[in-house]
Image (spheres, grey):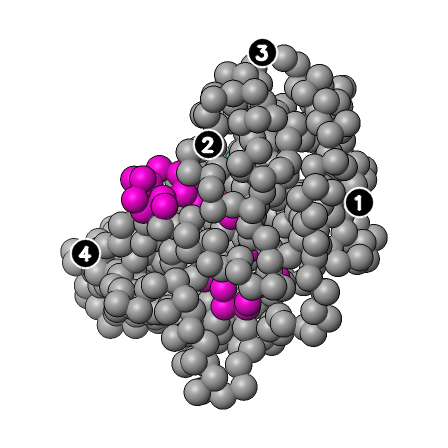
């Protein structure tokens, strides 16, 4: 039995408190199929989120089989299934792969056979067996809704909450989905609730709850709906509701409620006290499932593979092109000494030559750094924001933000390492940058790529959309070069103010500090910017990486539901 007692849900609007839901009292037994209907904006989704534990009631209590959820905590993740209108499956994966991932993330299975049985059972209970090998992107609207339901069934939830899962479908598909939900509710431990705007075909529901402006104005069998509102057909209920204030409808209903509840004698079957819900898998299992799924999606996406390959190959070539004129030059500084007037002129020339060369070497290092920051932002800007709606659902289903973030870090680390390694090795082979040792040079490139990837991952976790995250990340990269001070010197005070945040500066300065001493002397002469010692550069870049990851963790944990 699900019972809501005098529930109020209010939000702050300016100084005022606005109640989106008020005085909600209702009881629904398990094994029951309930519709929540009402004009758009009346609070249906808000009520569903409240039951799901996404919204926290301002006052009142919710009970599930005598357990006070408001005091004793919400239902466990595997006990609830929450389905929204929009597909929450990965388009590139097949129906079966999506369900398999859901099982790995949300349900613990004892053996390989049990795992297969569960996947098959879910496929067959939702009529998706014949479609198991189809990629989600080719599914019809109705098939997608089936899949959304299937993903929630992997834990055999006691409470299945569906928000507009039939909206926007043709009448035949709508009917099929309602029949499917009805079938899923014929199970004595489960309660299925469906929010719908449509008042047509309510026959299969055991009860219909009518909401108007955040108040319950009716909750009874569908066949009594017309009688209660004195209308000919159910579709006339909304116009009828508009004729009186919601408060008046609500107070009439509160007088009738107990009589209705008694006459229809909705009784909960003796609450089966067995725990029917699966246990959520451990963090490591979730991490592996997410990591595996990320790579599968990567390899399915031709566009992404081509882009990554193009960037990996083209960017180092771009750096090398700038050096074509001076391939031999970077190899050797000129060191003749004057003994005559002719030699004095020669020396002046050689100093100019050396200064130019120093400029070229420092510029090459900066170019490497900037291209790696660009790769970094491209790696991660959309990574979380682009799948946020799926992630929020999976979090509700028991996926740990830490396991999720760890899978992202592991996936991105592979990209970052490949990109930085190839950038170092290729450019070195062509340009022979005179670093004393290539290891610090490589590590500094790795760290700047890692820092930008981590920071953009942080942005991605906070952004409202993938586009917003991309845009912010591009701005961030765009500011790296001018604010690094490597090309144009900033006013001194501005340099000290911005430099701490500019990853590109620290990577570049560290690389320059690691150049052969003669080169370093000339680079100091052509550069007006303060050059930090290498150890400090490493330190700051590590702080950037950690900072980005910390923000990404906080951003991932924070709930972010689209309304
Ligand atoms: N977090 C929120 N902040 C402000 N207003 C909200 C919030 N959530 C919902 N609302 C408002 O509450 C009302 C009910 O929303 P909702 O429950 O989504 O309606 P519906 O019945 O169409 O599902 C709407 O007017 C909506 O704009
Ligand atoms: Mg809604």
Up the image or down, 374 lies above or below 412; here it is: above
Residue 243 numbered tag:
3
- In the rendered structure, which disc, 4 or 3, sits on the residue that comes first in sequence? 3
Q: Residues within 10 Å of mark 2 (few under 14, many from 20)?
A: some
Report the Cα–Cα distance between label 4 and label 3: 75 Å
- In the rendered structure, which disc, 4 or 2, sits on the residue that comes first in sequence? 2
Q: Residue at x 80, y 45 (%)?
A: 61
The verdict on residue 173 being magenta is yes
Query: Closer to the camera: disc 2 or disc 1?
Result: 2
Q: Position of residue 9 (x, y in %)?
A: 72, 34
Q: Residue at x 31, y 69 (%)?
A: 129
Q: Which residues are magenta?
A: 151-175
Report the Cα–Cα distance between label 2 and label 3: 18 Å
Query: Can you identify the residue that label 4 sits on?
Result: 321
- In the rendered structure, which disc, 4 or 1, sits on the residue that comes first in sequence? 1
Up the image or down, 285 lies above or below 5; here it is: below
Residue 199 numbered tag:
2
């Amino acid at each position: 039995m699900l019972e809501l007692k005098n529930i109020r849900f209010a939000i702050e609007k300016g100084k005022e408190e606005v109640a989106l839901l008020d005085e909600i009292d209702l009881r629904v037994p398990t094994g029951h199929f309930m519709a929540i209907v009402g004009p758009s904006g009346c609070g249906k989704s808000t009520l569903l989120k409240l039951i799901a534990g996404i919204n926290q009631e301002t006052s009142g209590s919710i009970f599930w089989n005598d357990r006070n959820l408001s005091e004793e905590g919400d239902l466990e993740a595997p006990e609830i299934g929450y389905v929204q209108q929009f597909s929450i499956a990965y388009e590139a994966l097949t129906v079966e792969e999506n369900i398999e991932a859901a099982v790995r993330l949300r349900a613990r299975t004892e053996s390989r056979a049990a795992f297969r049985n569960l996947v098959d059972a879910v496929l067959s209970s939702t009529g998706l067996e014949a479609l198991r090998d189809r990629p989600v992107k080719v599914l019809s609207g109705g098939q997608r809704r089936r899949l959304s339901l299937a993903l929630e069934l992997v834990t055999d939830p006691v409470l299945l909450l569906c928000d507009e899962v039939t909206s926007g479908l043709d009448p035949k598909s709508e009917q099929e989905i309602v029949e499917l939900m009805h079938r899923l509710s014929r199970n004595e431990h489960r309660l299925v609730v469906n929010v719908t705007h449509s008042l047509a075909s309510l026959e299969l529901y055991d009860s219909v709850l009518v909401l108007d402006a955040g108040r319950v104005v009716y909750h009874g069998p569908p066949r009594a709906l017309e009688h209660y509102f004195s209308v000919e057909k159910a579709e006339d209920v909304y116009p009828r509701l508009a004729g009186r204030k919601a408060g008046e409808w609500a107070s009439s209903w509160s007088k009738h409620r107990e009589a209705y509840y008694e006459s229809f004698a909705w009784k909960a079957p003796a609450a089966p006290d067995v725990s029917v819900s699966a246990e959520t898998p451990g963090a490591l299992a979730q991490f592996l499932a997410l990591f595996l799924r990320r790579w599968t999606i990567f390899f399915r996406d031709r566009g992404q593979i081509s882009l990554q390959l193009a960037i990996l190959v083209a960017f180092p070539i771009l750096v090398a092109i700038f050096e074509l004129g001076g391939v031999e030059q970077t190899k050797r500084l000129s060191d003749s000494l004057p003994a005559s007037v002719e030699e004095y002129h020669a020396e002046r020339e050689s100093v100019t030559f050396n200064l130019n060369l120093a400029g070229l070497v420092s510029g090459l290092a900066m170019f490497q750094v900037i291209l790696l920051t660009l790769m970094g932002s491209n790696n991660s800007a959309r990574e979380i924001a682009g799948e946020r709606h799926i992630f929020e659902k999976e979090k509700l289903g028991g996926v740990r933000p830490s396991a999720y973030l760890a899978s992202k870090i592991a996936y991105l680390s592979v990209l970052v390492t490949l990109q930085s390694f190839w950038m170092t090795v290729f450019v070195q082979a062509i340009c022979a940058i005179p670093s004393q040792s290539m290891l610090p040079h490589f590590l500094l490139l790795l760290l700047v790529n890692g820092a930008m990837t981590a920071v953009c991952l942080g942005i991605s976790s906070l952004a409202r959309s993938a586009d917003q995250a991309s845009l912010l990340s591009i701005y961030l990269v765009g500011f790296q070069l001018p604010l690094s001070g490597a090309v144009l010197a900033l006013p001194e005070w501005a340099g000290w103010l911005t430099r701490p945040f500019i990853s590109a500066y620290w990577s570049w300065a560290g690389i320059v500090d690691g150049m052969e001493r003669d080169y370093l002397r000339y680079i100091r002469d052509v550069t007006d910017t303060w050059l930090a010692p290498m150890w400090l550069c490493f330190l700051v870049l590590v702080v950037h990486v950690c900072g980005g990851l910390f923000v990404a963790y906080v951003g991932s944990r924070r709930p972010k539901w689209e309304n």
